[in-house]
Image (cartoon, helix red, strand yellow):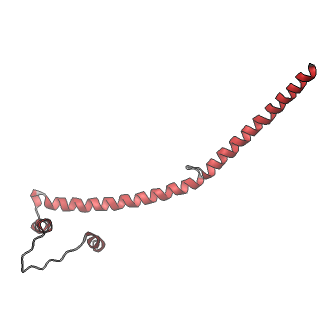
Amino acid sequence: MSSARTRQRRQTSFIKTFIGPTLTLASIVYFGFQALNGQFGLVGKAQIEKEIMRLELERDRLHAERVTLQRRVQLLSPDSLDPDLVDERARASLNLAHPNEVAIIIHREQAAKTTP
């Protein structure tokens, strides 16, 4: 019976000796890989920085568009009503023009390119 206990101790000792370092090594490899290639690792950091730059450019574009729209709304306020702007909006909405008028239609994309 003592040989069976000795054999069982050897197996238990071998399993404990083998599993501990193996799990430690597997953990180190996993976390090392994630530190380099994970979503928030070194590679992911470059992608996040590119996304930040893209979003900042979009924010600046939207800010410029907002300023332009605020100017147009200010022109439509009752205190400083611009007759030309009211005329332009009325003609665009109603699609009307006098027979002796010449209408020059500027699309928004062209207007955005010409305005600084």
Give the image location of residue 17, x and y in percent: 81, 33
Q: Quadrant of residue 75?
A: bottom left
Screen quadrant of the N terminus: top right
Position of residue 79 in the picture relative to residue 108 (left or right)? left
Compared with residue 3, is residue 40 higher up or lower down, i.e. above or below? Answer: below
Q: How many marks?
A: 0
Q: Residue furthest left?
A: 99
Position of residue 76 measured from the top left corner of the image (x, y, whole percent)? 14, 60
Q: For residue 102, which quarter of the picture? A: bottom left
Return the residue nearer the eye: 34 or 8: 8
Q: Quadrant of residue 108?
A: bottom left
* Location of residue 116 in the rendering, given as x and y in whole percent from the top left corner: 29, 71
**Left or right relative to 57: residue 106:** left
Which residue of the protein is positioned furthest toward the top in this rendering?
Answer: 1
From the viewer's perspective, tell me whether residue 43 is left or right of residue 89: right
- In the depicted structure, whether residue 61 falls above or below residue 23: below
> Who is closer to the viewer here, 55 or 23?
23
- Residue at 29% x, 70% y: name it: 109
Residue at the spot 9% in from the left edge and 67% down from the top edge = 83
Q: Position of residue 43 (x, y in %)?
A: 58, 55
Q: Is residue 103 above or below residue 67?
A: below
In the figure, 62 relative to 114: above or below? above
